[in-house]
Image (spheres, rainbow, N blue to C red):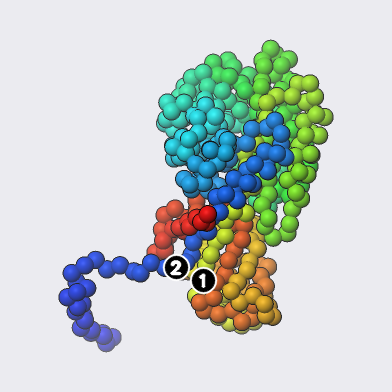
């Protein structure tokens, strides 16, 4: 029989037993968010696309201070869930100026949004069109077109969207069941680096509009989606280049039949306004590879580093000396919690425990993917810039 190890429990001191055990609050990780910088970016997007209404995509960062500031600056909102509908309205948005962009929704969520005054919903199938007609009668709908996602860091193709022929049929069905076939929408992929990426879907949209007008319908809205980039690793053209390319495409493909236009930027508004601040837990050599363990990782704000899709610019408290390649790892015990293993990052050779690593352009899709604790770690908090 195998020997067993017997231990005697050590009693807790009375002062500990008398109160709940609490772990001291950690200084990091957190998102440092400059709301004023996000508002400035929102205005620059509007200036690059004159005549086009800007609907901030709440999903990118739903911070209530940010939403209130954007609403005060004149932003409208793109919402994708009941929580986002409520957040936008509480921030000061008019329900009639929201677009519910999720193409597949729970019936109850459609009814909820409609009761609050939301009147514009996105669909991409006949089934979803029938659902909206039953849950929000008389509403307006946009049909989402599929795109290739070419030129983007995070492609949004496959899961949503249909062909221009299918979109025409769906919008004709929408009219037949009492909905307003407002038009079409599309998304060219997140962190889109090619300003010409909007041309092909605008051409597809023009074909849908022409087909609908041919049967007596009067579509009036084209949602150009998001995809406008932040200043992530690899660089990107200036916003003005995107505005100019989109304007040329609208004139070429739609001409005198140009509808109202809206955009739904998320990353382009808030990413550059945020920096994720983390601390080095350990630097470990495993064979020839240097591993830098951080107190932030895939499950605590950095989910977009999966497959190395999004690469954040990095700076550290040890900058200034020689650098070398390393792999980053998050704090959880999950083996997926690894960043940039295929293409390691260059960080100072003198980097060690307690040093700070800052990931810039991280204001988007960081706090929204860590709103609950994971694997024993708290969600990523936000600290706002002062002044």
Q: Is residue 211 visible?
A: yes
Residue 236's spot in the image, x, y percent? Answer: 74, 53
Check disc 1: other Cα within 10 Å, few if <14, some if 14-19, many if 20+: many
Marks 1 and 2: in contact by CB < 8 Å?
yes
Judging depth in this view, the residue of 239 and 176 nearest the camera is: 239
Identify the residue at image location x=62%, y=38%: 264
Residue 206's spot in the image, x, y percent? Answer: 75, 26
- N-term-proximal mark, 2 vs 1: 2
Judging depth in this view, the residue of 161 and 250 nearest the camera is: 250
Q: Is residue 337 visible?
A: no
Q: Residue furthest top?
A: 216
Q: Quadrant of the N terminus?
A: bottom left
Residue 223 disc label = none
Judging depth in this view, the residue of 253 and 162 nearest the camera is: 253
Check disc 2: other Cα within 10 Å, few if <14, some if 14-19, many if 20+: few
| Element on which disc 1 rests | strand
Residue 328's spot in the image, x, y percent? Answer: 58, 70
For disc 2, the marked residue is 27
Q: Is residue 102 toward the left or the right of residue 165 in the image?
A: left
Q: Where 141 sits versus 11, above or below?
A: above
Judging depth in this view, the residue of 382 and 157 nearest the camera is: 382
For disc 1, the marked residue is 279
């Amino acid at each position: 029989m195998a020997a067993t190890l017997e231990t005697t429990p050590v009693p807790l001191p009375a002062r500990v037993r008398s109160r709940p055990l609490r772990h001291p609050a950690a200084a990091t990780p957190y998102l440092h968010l400059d709301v004023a910088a996000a508002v400035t970016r929102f205005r620059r997007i509007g200036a690059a696309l004159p005549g086009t209404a800007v609907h901030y995509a709440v999903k990118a960062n739903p911070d209530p201070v940010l939403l209130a500031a954007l609403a005060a600056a004149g932003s409208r909102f793109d919402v994708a869930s009941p929580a986002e509908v409520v957040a936008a309205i509480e921030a000061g948005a008019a329900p009639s100026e929201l677009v519910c962009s999720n193409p597949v929704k729970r019936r109850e969520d459609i009814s909820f949004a409609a009761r609050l005054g939301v009147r514009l919903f996105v669909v991409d199938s006949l089934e979803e069109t029938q659902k909206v007609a039953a849950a929000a009668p008389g509403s307006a709908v946009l049909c989402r077109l599929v795109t290739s996602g070419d030129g983007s860091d995070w492609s949004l193709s496959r899961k949503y969207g249909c062909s221009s022929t299918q979109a025409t049929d769906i919008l004709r069905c929408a009219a037949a069941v009492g909905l307003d076939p407002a038009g079409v929408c599309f998304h060219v992929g997140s962190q889109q680096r090619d300003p010409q990426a909007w041309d092909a879907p605008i051409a597809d949209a023009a074909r849908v509009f022409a087909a609908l007008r041919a049967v007596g319908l009067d579509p009036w809205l084209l949602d150009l989606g998001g995809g406008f980039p932040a200043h992530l690793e690899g660089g990107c053209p200036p916003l003005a280049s995107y505005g100019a390319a989109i304007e040329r495409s609208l004139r070429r493909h739609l001409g005198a039949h140009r509808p109202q236009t809206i955009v739904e930027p998320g990353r382009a508004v808030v990413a550059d306004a945020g920096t994720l601040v983390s601390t080095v837990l350990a630097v470990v050599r495993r064979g020839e590879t240097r591993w830098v363990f951080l107190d932030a990782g895939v499950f605590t704000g950095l989910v977009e580093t999966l497959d190395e899709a999004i690469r954040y610019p990095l700076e550290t408290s040890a900058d200034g000396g020689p650098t070398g390649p390393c792999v980053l790892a998050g704090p959880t015990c999950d083996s997926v919690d690894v960043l940039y293993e295929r293409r390691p990052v260059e960080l100072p050779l003198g980097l060690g425990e307690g040093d700070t690593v800052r990931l810039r352009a991280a204001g988007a899709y960081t706090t929204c993917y860590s709103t609950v604790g994971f694997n024993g770690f708290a969600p990523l908090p936000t600290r706002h810039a002062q002044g």
